[in-house]
Amino acid sequence: MDLEDRGCGLSRRDFLRTALTATAGLALSGVADAQDQPAAPKHALPPHDPRVVYRRLGRTGVAISHIAAAWDWNEWLYEEAVKAGVNYWHKIAGWPQLPECLGKLDREAWYCDVVVDSLEEEGAYAQFEWSRQHLGLAYVDEMKLHSLYETPEQVGTKTGVFKAFERLKAEGKVRHLAAAQHGGNTAAICTEMILSGHFDHLQPAVSVAAPPEMLAMLKLAQEHEVGIIGKKVMGAVGLAQRNPQVRAAVEKHLGPDGKWGAAVIKTVLAIPGVTAVTARCQSYEQFVDNLSPGGIAPTGEDQAAAEELRKFARAEVCSYCGACLAGCPRGLPISDILRFAAYHQAYELPTHARRLYAQLPATRQAAQCADCGACERACPQEMAVRRKLREAHALLA
């Protein structure tokens, strides 16, 4: 059955009618109480696959699939994702051209963002426009700042990008402003972005081991109707699967063939304020592992498995809260260094990880650690930060 047969060539009106009918039949009773009940998407793909659930993305009003895809998924999965009902695509400027399976669709049946790497008005405007024109799109749903703020204060002082967004919005080229944030001090920076009133949705790093300040920020986002798409949710999974002790503990609850990805995704989606997640997907096996036939409410087995992963993650995986940064006497970007190491180990992107690390001045690389222990005293996870820094340098240098 091709895309046209499955409804992917429907008009906007037919999409709405089909989606209303199909969504009504889904089992939605397991959704976390703190999260809005999913509603039928107004301009989204019909949910061909009941394993995909649509949820409202904050005050944007759009209903997006609970799993958002990204440009760096294996390209052979694009059509599979569309057939399943995945309707949000992150960071699409990475594509050399728009994938055929999306180009066939009614444009209002799917959503996307283009990231910009400049806080200056002209730089942000030009970068966004180049990406939009390059992909041949009349408009892009979200202009997304790509982890640009280094401190919360910059949200109120670096305002050129807001002017670029307003220009583009007035020209009908973009609809919403968003931001991804995954460096140090993520929770504090995201809190400031929420309170600024400029941002319709945020994409912070969120894991099963989210620290208290991250949970408080997510609750604030919910109160202000700022949608949240969690990223880097699988940060602990790859490492945990290679650890025999942790694997055995998780499989005790999920079984040897259990869905690790689905358990993590459902656990993160149950956090108040989280709308959807992006999850790296490089194979069909990963794609299937991330989808649950039983809806998106975590079962007791999911929660027990996630607790094992949470214990492991707190000891081994940085949550990028930034608490360690203020205490470091040499001002090392600890969160960034550990993030680069995660790209190498958990995401299997060694070349990308080493390139990012090489861009740091030698005075800010992990080899300059004074071994004073201030970072570990500040870490709310009580992680062995100094050991992790040594390991990161050996891996990346």
Image (cartoon, grey):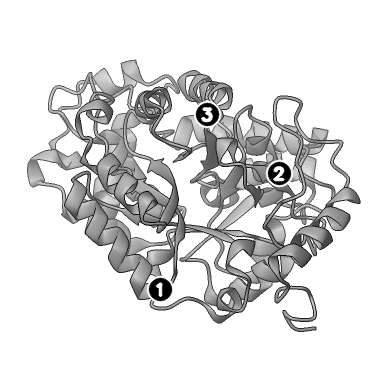
Could you tell me which secondary element the residue under label 3 belongs to?
loop
The mark that comes first in sequence, 1 or 3, is: 1
Q: CA distance from mark 2 to mark 3?
A: 15 Å
Q: Nearer the viewer, residue 98 or 306?
A: 98
Residue 106 versus residue 249: which sits nearer the camera?
106
Residue 137 percent location from the top left of the image: 44, 70
Q: Which residue is mark 2?
A: 263
Categorize mark 1 by other alpha carbons within 10 Å: few (<14), some (14-19), many (20+).
some
- Could you tell me the amino acid type at mark 2? Ala
Q: Amino acid at mark 1?
A: Leu
Residue at the outermost bottom position: 2
Tell me where residue 171 sits by quadrant.
bottom left
CA neighbours of label 2 inside 10 A, class few (<14), some (14 to 19), many (20+): many
- Judging depth in this view, the residue of 383 and 122 nearest the camera is 122
Label 1 and label 2: CA atoms lie apart by 35 Å
Cβ atoms at labels 2 and 3 below 8 Å apart: no
Q: Is residue 121 above or below residue 369?
A: below
Kindly state the secondary structure of the residue where label 2 is placed.
helix
Which quarter of the rendering shows the C terminus? Answer: bottom left
Give how far across and how far down residue 235 sits, in percent.
50, 45
Residue 248 visible, this orientation: no
Residue assigned mark 1: 135
Look at label 3 and name its amino acid: Ala
**SS category of the residue bearing label 1:** helix
Q: Which residue is mark 3?
A: 210
Percent x, y of residue 239: 51, 48
Q: Nearer the viewer, mark 1 or mark 3?
A: 1
CA gap, disc 1 and disc 3: 36 Å
Q: Upstream in the sequence, badge 1 or badge 2?
A: 1
For the residues labelled 1 and 3, say whether their Cβ atoms are less than 8 Å apart. Answer: no
Q: Earlier in the sequence, mark 2 or mark 3?
A: 3
Residue 383 in the figure: left or right of residue 364: right
